[in-house]
Image (cartoon, helix red, strand yellow):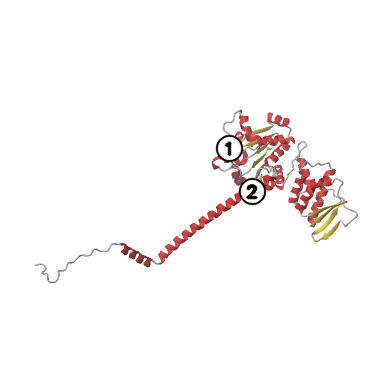
Amino acid sequence: MGGVPVLESGPPQEESTSFGMKKSIAVGSNIETLFGTRDENLHVLEDGLNITIDLRSNGLEVEGAPRDVARAEQVFADYDHLQRSGFTFNNGDLNSMLRVLTADPKVTLRGLAEAGKQRSFGRRTVQPKSVNQRRYLEAIEKHDMVFGIGPAGTGKTYLAVAMAISALLAKRVNRIILARPAVEAGERLGFLPGTLQDKIDPYLRPLYDALYDMLDPEKVDRYLEKNVIEIAPIAFMRGRTLNDSFVIMDEAQNTTSEQMKMFVTRLGFNSKAVITGDITQIDLPNARRSGLVEAVDILKPVEGLAFVYFDESDVVRHHLVQRIIRAYDDHKTRVAEQQMLLSLEGKAAEVRSTETKSAEAKSRERNPIAEGAIADGAASSSSPAPSQERIVLPLPGSRGNE
């Protein structure tokens, strides 16, 4: 692996400081392309590695802990090697890679770039924009069935479709099958006009969007016409065995238990399946339990499966989406805490009532005579007084009964 040339003159290359060490690094002529707009990429390195980077006329000066300075030097070396080998970074990819490698000490810039080339299709490559996205892509490569669970905007469906297209163009599979449950998000669409395809298209539009974003429209239409890419509701999966296929189920949180079991048992030889969903957006009627939630509980011990979880830090949509998701999560947490507090207060009141009754019962058992006397006294006070006989005495001087 090529290294960055070091300075041969000027100040010492290394010196100890109160913050660790300071090292001067000479860099290639095109290193400024690494810096990004307004040096945003350097700021990512500084914040992620806890270092400071100063620009000098003849190179860079990096200060921080020895291990962090060494990692920064490795980034510059990798970037120089990639540029010399003709690698080009697409818009935003370099910034995303730097965020990933600063969050995971095992990751290198060169390793991320070369892994992305292996997932390329046409002139595009599939690059993760977060640590969890990297784990997701690696899980899809290593396992035949992967569950991607997390909030909207984290790239679950988009990356799965990208990996499917990459596998198709590399001839690792013969077709792509995209499935989704036909469940409305809190609405009732009624009887839609048109053919069966016209009726189910509104439910499957997000999958079409991902396809058209990655391939030329003419190629997508040709694949759809020849059934190389097939898009269908979950109900159409029953009874099929899917060989040599890359199968994706989107919005899996809206499957029933029966639908989920039916889908995960469709996998045939030389096939992969990716199941994506957001368990916070379940639209099943009558509060039925989600098949995705049940599958997580049942299938976790099964070997050969992988579960990857996303959070708001993985959101790659508008920056407001991260804040909105975090606000909903915080609200859900507060409501759960309030409900738990009310439940605990209710249980405490019930316990106090039970203890009071128990104490009264024990008191009666200890003083049965007193209890009996009290009971007798209460009985006598409540019973009516006995009737008295009236006696009439004669008056003085009266003759009485003669």
Mark seen at residue 187? 1
Residue 32 picture location, percent across and down: 83, 46
Residue 25, placed above or below residue 371: above
Residue at 66 percent of width and 33 percent of height:
230
Where's the C terminus, which quadrant?
Answer: bottom left
240 relative position to 58: left or right? left
Q: Secondary structure at mark 1?
A: loop
The amino acid at mark 1 is Glu
Task: List the residue tagged with mark 2.
Answer: 327
Spot occupied by residue 400 in the image (x, y as percentages of width and height): 11, 68
Q: CA distance from mark 2 to mark 1?
A: 24 Å
Question: Where 324 falls versus 65 (above or below)?
Answer: above
Mark 1 crowd level (few <14, some 14–19, many ≥20, 10 Å Cα): few
- Horizontal and vertical percent position of residue 119: 75, 40
Of the pair 39 and 184, the residue shown nearer to us: 39
**Residue 180 visible, this angle:** yes
Q: Residue furthest front?
A: 397
